[in-house]
């Protein structure tokens, strides 16, 4: 039976020159031979919407999958049991450099005009060599909120916009 082992920064401290937070996953076959290792760092990713890479993305937050749970009693044992209920659609927030083309606002405006354009979004994790180390695919996505740039005369960074996306299905795929 294939197996896996994961090591966090505490186990790998002093064994690598890589800085920052990371996780190392090692995957084995039935004989114990290494199938692949994946090191994914939180700053090595790219974002695609309908297969087109989005430039200037600073952060992606809220990649979660959640279900309600239903409580019930079974007989006289006095124990409250649970079972899965409805699966909740997810929400994520993407922050990127603002541009005057405002494609994200146009997508949001379509929703306001009653023309929901559902799209697919992929968050693609990359290893140190820039190769795909895994991905999260999100389906039936549409913008529930768009926030324009915060303006501050004392700021020295780029103006950024945020978009909150709702999705119906999340799929996690291991790297190659």
Image (cartoon, rainbow, N blue to C red):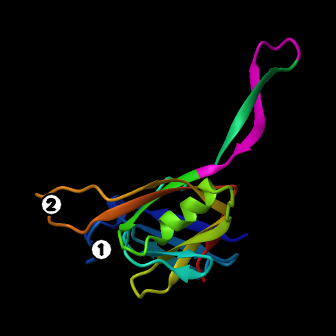
Q: Residue at x 60, y 83 (%)?
A: 176
Where is residue 25 drawn, in percent x and y? 50, 70
Q: CA distance from mark 1 to mark 2?
A: 39 Å
- The answer to whether residue 23 is seen in the rendering is yes
Q: Which residues are magenta?
A: 75-90
**Could you tell me if the residues under marks 1 and 2 are in contact, i.e. CB atoms within 8 Å?**
no
Judge left or right: residue 46 versus residue 50. Answer: left
The residue singled out by tag 1 in the image is: 15
Numbered disc in front, either 1 or 2: 2
Q: Residue at x 52, y 82 (%)?
A: 132
Judge left or right: residue 73 versus residue 47. Answer: right
Judge left or right: residue 53 versus residue 55. Answer: right
- N-term-proximal mark, 1 vs 2: 1
> Can residue 86 be found in the magenta stretch?
yes
The residue singled out by tag 2 in the image is: 155
- The answer to whether residue 64 is seen in the rendering is no
Where is residue 170 drawn, in percent x and y? 66, 60
Look at the magenta stretch and give its main secondary structure.
strand
> Can residue 166 be found in the magenta stretch?
no
Above or below, 35 against 11 in this view is: below
């Amino acid at each position: 039976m294939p197996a896996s082992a994961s090591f966090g920064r505490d186990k790998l401290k002093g064994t690598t020159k890589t800085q920052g937070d990371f996780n190392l996953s090692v995957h084995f076959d039935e004989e114990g031979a290494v199938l692949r290792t994946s090191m994914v760092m939180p700053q090595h990713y790219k974002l695609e919407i309908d297969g087109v890479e989005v430039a200037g993305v600073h952060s992606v937050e809220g990649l979660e999958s959640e279900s309600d749970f239903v409580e019930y009693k079974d007989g006289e044992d006095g124990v409250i049991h649970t079972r899965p209920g409805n699966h909740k659609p997810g929400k994520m927030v993407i922050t990127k450099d603002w541009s005057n083309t405002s494609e994200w606002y146009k997508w949001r405006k379509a929703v306001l005009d009653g023309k929901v354009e559902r799209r697919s979004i992929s968050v693609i994790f990359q290893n140190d060599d820039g190769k795909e180390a895994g991905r999260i695919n999100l389906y039936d996505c549409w913008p529930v909120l768009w926030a324009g740039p915060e303006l501050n005369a004392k700021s020295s960074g780029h103006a950024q916009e945020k978009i909150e996306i709702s999705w119906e299905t999340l799929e996690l795929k291991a790297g190659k």
